[in-house]
Amino acid sequence: MTATLPGPAPLRGQHPVSPTVLAAAQAQALAEREGYSLAGDRVVDRQGRPVLGWLVQNGGAYDEHGYLVALSAAVGVAKTLLVGY
């Protein structure tokens, strides 16, 4: 079984995209859309919250299905400190 990316039909000589390649591309797109990045040994979203199911191993980030995703390091995750009056 193969899948194809949305859009026009493939040009001559192009091959359908395998489900594995499609799933890996979807994981990468999700990470980019949600602002995922590496923070030490975990994957965090743009607010600095850990992303459940994702893991970091040997410097690579993997989604909950085991697909390797390219992520940048988290930079300056903002935190709010509440001080009593």
Image (tube, rainbow, N blue to C red):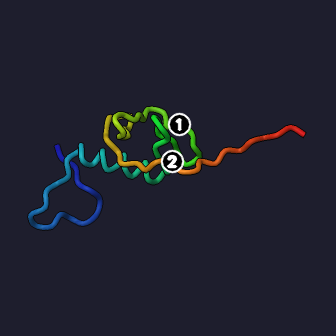
Judge from the rendering whether residue 49 lies leftward or rightward of residue 60; answer left or right: right
Residue under the point 49% across and 37% down: 51
Q: What residue sits right under mark 2 in the picture? A: 74
Which of the 4 image quarters holds residue 68?
A: top left
Give the percent coordinates (x, y) of residue 30: 42, 49
Give the label, 2 or 1, closer to the camera: 2
In this view, the residue in front, 14 or 38, is 38
Q: Position of residue 46 (x, y in %)?
A: 55, 49
Looking at the rendered structure, the kind of residue marked 2 is Ala
Q: Residue at x 43, y 50 (%)?
A: 72
Quadrant position of residue 16:
bottom left
Disc tally is 2
Vertical placement of residue 4 versus 51, above or below: below
Residue 78 left/right relative to 11: right
Residue located 36% across and 33% down the image: 57
Above or below — where is 65 with respect to 6?
above
Q: Which quadrant holds the N terminus?
A: top left
x and y percent of residue 9 in the render? 20, 64
The kind of secondary structure element at disc 2 is loop
Rendering coords of residue 65 (x, y %): 34, 34
Q: Is residue 85 above or below residue 35?
A: above
Nearest the eye: 63 or 84: 84
Q: Amino acid at mark 1?
A: Pro
Identify the image quadrant of the C terminus: top right
What distance separates the C-alpha of mark 2 from that of mark 1? 12 Å
- Decide which of tag 2 and tag 1 comes sooner along the chain: 1
Q: Nearer the viewer, residue 6 or 71?
A: 71
Q: Residues within 10 Å of mark 1 (few under 14, many from 20)?
A: some
- Please give the residue where the numbered disc 1 appears in the rendered image: 50
Q: Secondary structure at mark 1?
A: loop
Q: Residues within 10 Å of mark 2 (few under 14, many from 20)?
A: some
